[in-house]
Image (cartoon, rainbow, N blue to C red):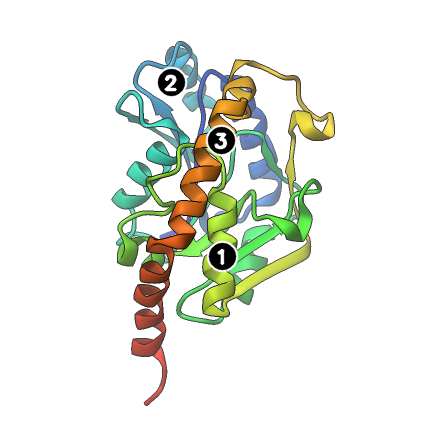
Amino acid sequence: MSDLLMIVPTRNRPQNAMDLYRAWVDSTSAESALLFVCDEDDPQLHSYKNQMRWMPRAQLLTVPVGLRMVGALNHAASLFTVDYQYLGFMGDDHRTRTYGWDDRIRGVIKHPVGVAYGNDLLQGENMPTAVVLTSNIVDKLGYMVPPCLEHLCADLVWKDWGEALGCLIYLDDVYIEHMHPANGKAMMDAGYERANSSDQSTRDAQAYYSYKDGDFNRDVAKLKELLAVSSPQ
């Protein structure tokens, strides 16, 4: 059975899901699993479901309306903490480019708690826009991303957790390309406009800084308990 599940929230972009899947098949070992997560009210849900016949290595999960990206990711991740050693996130605009990227990431996570990411060719080391976490992080905290966030700043939190625990790993030569309007690799659409609007940016930035000033230290203390239990006496 696979020990790594990558979760991909997606909305109204079935072609993105297909393009991601093709890159996945070309670069990912059979030991890793892929899950697309769609809203129940997605206007193109029928297209996603039809495409699954052409995606034998992927699964589709529908989630309740209104969760937004973070809520959908947390909902899906909470279902699989027992089944997988590693849980990861990619956007539907990420493309795995390095053959065996997943095996590389497995190989470098030596600690019982780990946060690892590759080079997205946009943010690079600065930000894990796609990430792999040990699933015990999600199990311990009850979420993969602080639920105060809606869409943005999740990558900042993952990096903060990894740095605070001393278990952050960056692989510069593992490419998980971010096909985003910011680097001219995707067209602006309603999803990008909503996610990058000034209102959304303000809400998520305020929520992020409130989290850093509040529950962040509590969460890090919980995760350090995992390290303590796993350390030799």
Q: Is residue 10 above or below residue 1?
A: above
Q: Is residue 41 visible?
A: yes
Q: Earlier in the sequence, mark 3 or mark 2?
A: 2
Q: Are marks 3 and 2 in contact (CB under 8 Å)?
A: no
Question: What SS does tag 3 mark?
Answer: helix
Q: Which residue is mark 2?
A: 49
Mark 3 against mark 2, which lies toward the viewer? 3
Q: Which residue is mark 3?
A: 202
Q: Is residue 99 above or below residue 94?
A: below
Residue closer to the observer: 11 or 28: 11
Locate residue 51 relative to residue 79 in the image: left or right: right
Q: Are marks 1 and 3 in contact (CB under 8 Å)?
A: no
Residue closer to the observer: 134 or 202: 202
The crowd level at tag 3 (other Cα within 10 Å; few <14, some 14-19, many 20+) is few
Q: Is residue 3 visible?
A: no
The quadrant in which the C terminus is found is bottom left
Mark 1 against mark 3, which lies toward the viewer? 3
Q: Which residue is mark 1?
A: 160
Q: Earlier in the sequence, mark 1 or mark 3?
A: 1
Residue 66: image x %, image y %? 31, 22
Quarter of the view holding residue 232:
bottom left
